[in-house]
Structures are given as structure tokens and as C-alpha cells.
Amino acid sequence: MPKNFADRLTEAVLAKRSQVCVGLDPRLDRMPPSLLARYTSEQGEENGRREIGACLEEFGTAIIEAVAPEVVAVKLQLACFEQYGAPGIRAFQRLCRRAAAAGLLVIADAKRGDIGISAQAYSAAFIGRPEGLDGKIDGYGADAMTVNPLFGSDGIEPFLDDCRSYGSGIFILVRTSNPGAAELQDLQVDGYGSVSQRIGGLVAGWGEGLHGDGGYSSVGAVIGATSAGAISGFRELLPRVIFLMPGYGAQGAGVADVASAFDSRGLGALITASRSIIYAGNGDDYAAEAAMAAASMREELWQAGGGGG
Amino acid sequence: MPKNFADRLTEAVLAKRSQVCVGLDPRLDRMPPSLLARYTSEQGEENGRREIGACLEEFGTAIIEAVAPEVVAVKLQLACFEQYGAPGIRAFQRLCRRAAAAGLLVIADAKRGDIGISAQAYSAAFIGRPEGLDGKIDGYGADAMTVNPLFGSDGIEPFLDDCRSYGSGIFILVRTSNPGAAELQDLQVDGYGSVSQRIGGLVAGWGEGLHGDGGYSSVGAVIGATSAGAISGFRELLPRVIFLMPGYGAQGAGVADVASAFDSRGLGALITASRSIIYAGNGDDYAAEAAMAAASMREELWQAGGGGG
């Protein structure tokens, strides 16, 4: 039986003394100029999509290999790759493999949500195995993915099946880090508190049977680090759920905001940062700069987040 | 200035006397056996992904060309393609072009939802133009796409920008057709009715400024045809919003369920069916069978749906 995702994550956190997940959301206008120039000059057919794919792959590979000692996971933003068609998707797929080879857990930040065969196909693609011409074939092979809960339980079940079969994990959007989140997620619903709290309750139920030996479930929750005051409330509601927390660094949240998400051993939350790490430098030493930014975030969090306290 | 999506859809409905959208959600285990056998025997490297892409493209092309006279739009389910990596995405891209060449409006059933640069990238990919190495390049070139509203307004704005710039449209998930939808979407929220009604209210606002000459907005709503009793309520709430309605046919909804979505000219709703059309036959004449199923659905709806009444 494949090892439970939550346990794999816990082991990595303790081994590396790191709760950092680097977000790889590459955009061309933020690439180091010398890197970009090389691909621009080679630009061929198909609007340069092939060269763009290669550029994203080179950038991502350099970042992954540089930050690997400091972080436990990489979260790849699908949108940044999908917009460049087949070459973009190929770059995404190769970066998933590179990250796994560098010993990182791979989170596909896909935020997919659908029902029936479509939910099955998304799950198979990222954290399971798709149906091929004669039997199952490899998908992108991520360890976990982000999922949108709007469809309710029958939209989530196909993902849970793959978590069980393949030792994968999912992180369900519970409270996102953007200002507009309030419009729907903070609405008060009869009997449940807010919509986000209701989603939280569902997440706890969906995670039953998927807890690892360490007590945490492979069904996690995305909770914006910018939700500040609300984080300790979510922690009380969801004691055995791992939080994936975007919004740290460039989006404004800091150590004090996320501290209440960790347990006494520094477990239970993965803090993601993208821009503040991957664009820490934009000269030829961009990867080394990224590693330094990741190291400093690792240290800052580990001191504050239970582990080093 | 590019022509408004809602107006382009209205023109197509009136010209073809059809409110049918065919859903292209191909899965290998439902392909006509003789078609599948050809690709299975050719299966090469990469787990046969290349042949799978080619198989999906051949099937989709045949369906698109056969049903084109009977339907106004094709809705391509991304999940079915994305699970096969770069070859799957290439098939998706080519089918978008084939459908446009056959005179159909193309709806990318992506159900994407994100914020900031990620929402921008998803929008650019499907209904706008991504940033290339030196200027904008072509994306998938769909006319419209489906979008998940969970993030609120700042998750929707990038899509609205592209609707304005490129004459594209979006269909926002308001009330989906699956049983689990009730768990979140039917919750009653303070001051707004249900969560779905609150989303509906937001959809009406997001569509301001995107109305065509015909009065409908390019910001539409996905409302399951299986929502039966609730459809007339949504129509009252959203008089100028086009409904994209899945759930007809194989999922159980019929003409009586969707009739209240149409205005007196038969406009205002696009009814989608997938399995009942694309798998109408599975012999060598599968495309002809699909065309017959589409024709019969077109006629049935047009009689009931205002247009032929």
C-alpha cells in the first residue's frame, strides 16, 4: 500500500526542519532578462510556444534544484503553463518529475472542480492514473493537488478514491487569500457559521479514513495566510487537517499571521511563497538568490512555528 | 471592436433554429471499437499518449462536422484532454479550431477559478491572448469558457477584461446539475436566499457593460437542467443572462424542465447534451448517429422552447 501523503509530508518537515512550499508561478515578464533573451532570439514557429516551454522549464529547474534543501514542497501553478499549449504542459510535466527527483513533494496548483467523469479525469491526470488504450497509464504524477469544493461531495469523491489508491493528497479551497473571497466565502449560512466554515466541516468529513500514523489527514485545506484573525478559528475547527497557506511574503502575511496554524512540533501547515522566492534576484544568480530567500523564510518560520520554539 | 459574444450566440440560434450545444467529453472506453482498435494497434511510446491524442481528435472531428448543421456550439470538456498531457492538449487545441471552422461557437468547459496572474493566465489561455516572448500570442481561441466563482470579484475581473477586449464570453457556475450541489450551493445565506442566488446576483453585476444589442450579456450562468423547479426562479432573477444548461438527456432532464429558461423568441438558454449525442451510436456510422440525435434534440427543444411555439 502506498504511504499516506500526510505522513510523507510530516516526515519531510521534520527531516528538513522546514514548513516552506515554494510556489512556481512563472511569468515571462518576470524572467531574468539574460535567460529570456536567449529564448527570444531562438524563437521559432507556433508563436514561440516551444521556446517559451523550454524557458519555463529551464527557469523552474534551476529554482527547484537551488531551493530543494530549504523547502519540502513545490506548488506548480497550472495556469502559467497551460496558457502555452502543449509545450507549456510538457514543461509542467517535466518540472513535476524534476521536483520529485530533487526530493520535493509536488503539489499541482490546479484548483480543479467538476463532477462525474470530469472530476475522475482531473484526479487521474494529477494524482492518479488515467485510462490508456489498454490499462492505466502515467499521469503528471503529483503528490497532491488543489481542488475547488463548489460541487459538493460527489465532486470530491473521485479525488478521495485516488488519495486512497495512490497515497496522494488534496488541498481543498476553504478560505482564499484575496480580498474578493469575502463576497462568497464569508457569507453567514444558517446553522454553519460562514460558507468557509461549512466547507471546513465538509473537509473534515472527507478526510475520514485518510489519516496517517501522525494523526493528520491527506485531505488538507487551503487557508490564506492573509486571513489573520480567522486562522486560529480554522485550526480549532480542523485540528487534524493540514493547512496550505498562500499569501506569505509578497501578498503581505508574515510569521505572526501563520503561527497559530502550527502544532507544538511545528507540523500541520505548509506556508507557500512564490514571488518573494522565485524573483528574489533576476540576474544570472537568480537561483542562488532564490535559495537564500527560501533559507531565510525557512529559518524565520521554524523559529516561530513551534519547531524551533 | 470585436462583436459581442451574446449577440453572436443569438444570431446563431436564430439562423439555425437551434438551442443545442453538444458536449464533447470523450472517454476511451466509450469510443467506437473499430476506431479505438486502430489506435491501440499503432500504440507507440509514452504510454500511447500520442495515439490517444490522435484518437480523440479523429473522434471529435467526426462528431463536430456531423452535428454542425444542428447545433450552435460545442462545449469541450478540458479534463478529458488534459489527462493525456501534451498530446491531449494538442487534440483539444485542434478541435477548437475545427469547431470554429465548422461555424460553431466554441465553449471551453474548463471551470477554472483563481486570482491575480493565475486568473489572467487562464483567461488569456482560453478566451484572450497570452503574453509571448515579444507581445501577445494566440491562445486556444475559444469563444467562451466556464468559470468557477468561489474567489469572488477579483477572481472574475481578468475574465471580464478579456470579454471586453476580444468579444468573448464566460459562463459562471451558479447552480450545478449534480446531487452534491445542494451541500454548498443551496445553503441559505443571510439576506441573499441561497448561495446560488447570491452568485446569481453577482453574475448580473459582473455582466454590466457586456450586454449586446439583443439585450443579453456575455456573462452567462451555468444552471443545471436538473434544477427543475428552480429554473424559473433563476430566470426571474437574471432576465438578461444566458443560461448554459447541462443535465439534459443522459442526466435526466427533459424539455419540460428547461422550457422556462427561454424567452418568447426561444433565446436566452443553451442546452447541452453530451453522452446522448456523442455516443448515440458506436459503430462505423457513429458520426451520422450523433447528427441524428442532435437533430432530434434540436427539433424537440425548438418546438417547446419558444422558437417554434
Image: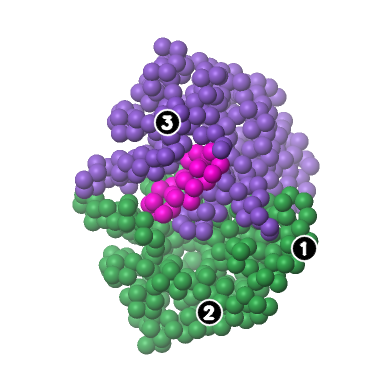
Chain colours: A green, B purple
Say yes or no: labels 1 and 2 on the same chain: yes
The quarter of the picture where residue B100 lies is top right
Residue displayed at 38% across by 22% down: B263
Question: Which one is in front in this view, the residue at disc 1 or the one at disc 2?
Answer: 1
User: Which amino acid, mark 1?
Assistant: Ser
Q: Can residue B58 be seen in this view?
A: yes
Q: Name the residue under label 2.
A: A294
User: Which amino acid, mark 2?
Assistant: Ala
- Please give left or right for residue B135 compared with residue A203 in the image: right
Residue displayed at 44% across by 49% down: B156
Q: Dot 2, crowdedness within 10 Å: few (<14), some or many (≥20)?
A: many
User: Where residue A268 sits: x, y (%)?
Assistant: 39, 72
User: Which amino acid, mark 3?
Assistant: Tyr
Q: Mark 1 points at which residue?
A: A41
The quarter of the picture where residue B214 lies is top left
- Please give left or right for residue B122 compared with residue B93 in the image: left
